[in-house]
Amino acid sequence: MPPMTPTPDQLLAVCEEAARAGAEELLAWRGRFQCRQKAPRDLVTDADLASERAIREVIRGRFPDHGMLGEEAPTPEDLLRPYCWIIDPLDGTTNYAHGIPCFAVSIAVACHGQLRAGVVLDPERRECFAAAVGRGATLNGEPMAVSRVQSLEECLAAISFPAHLVDDSPDLKAFLRAARRCQAIRRTGSAALNLAYVASGRLDAHWAHEIHPWDAAAGILLIREAGGVATGADGRPFDVAAADYLAASTPQLHRALLPLVAA
């Protein structure tokens, strides 16, 4: 068992092991799950629950005294514990439920609120985006980096909308402002993959105002370790508990986007 104070590399190894356990469940449940609504337009499947159980089993076996914050069993008070694992067992549930191959497992671990390691795993493409603080970011074990895009005109961005979108949503307003200035804007249906794609240089920016910690934590660390910029949506330091964010490949692009994205 790892020592009482695990290193970032040890934490990352457990992130990867747990993410793969969750991904195996998602692939095994394809085509035979039942789908329910947690709330209007907000789905949960048997696969979400099976994936989270598998992930928790791995983490609990390695670090039984650590806290866990997960989408299907949220316990916000665990963020206050010295170590807290932040788990999204299936980011992109609606895509998964409709057979659209754009979903991911997202796992991060924070120490006293500071992100230490994280993984976003795409089961369909067999892509594992991983990072540990101070160690850089990788895609399937190979170093990855953000793009060098600095201008709005060159920026391919992604947005995430909340399940309960209303006319005055800050995400909708930001989309309308940015769509007039950016090269193009995409919506994949998976915030975790959006962030991973910024970290790997496929996208140049991504933002969200109404989001959960488990959607963002791993991806934010990926971007930082890949050389990008990630703050709160209004430019303040990123807060794991609040989770809203603006992530961009370069400081110049972040500065250009901030007045368009800030609510």
Image (tube, helix red, strand yellow):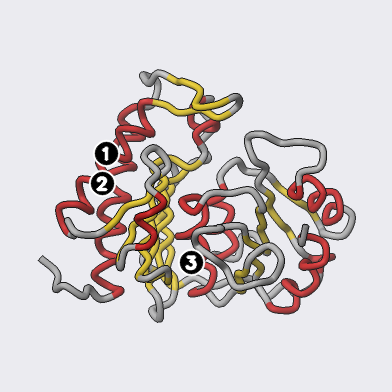
List the residue tagged with mark 1.
53
Which residue shows up at 39% across the image and 62% down it?
Answer: 118
**Image mark for residue 180:** none
List the residue tagged with mark 3.
222
* Quarter occupied by the N terminus: bottom left
Q: Residues within 10 Å of mark 2 (few under 14, many from 20)?
A: many
Horizontal and vertical percent position of residue 163: 63, 35
As measured in the structure, the alpha-carbon distance from the residue carrying label 2 to the one carrying label 1 is 5 Å
Q: Residues within 10 Å of mark 3 (few under 14, many from 20)?
A: many
Q: Amino acid at mark 3?
A: Leu
Q: Are the residues tagged 2 and 1 within 8 Å (C-beta)? A: yes
List the residue tagged with mark 2.
56
Q: Residues within 10 Å of mark 1 (few under 14, many from 20)?
A: some
**In the rendered image, the vertical position of residue 219 relative to residue 147, given as above or below:** above
Which residue shows up at 32% across the image and 63% down it?
Answer: 81
For mark 1, give the secondary structure.
helix
For mark 3, give the secondary structure.
helix
- Give the mark nearer the N terminus: 2 vs 3: 2
Which of the 4 quarters of the picture holds residue 246?
A: bottom right
Q: Are the residues tagged 1 and 3 within 8 Å (C-beta)? A: no
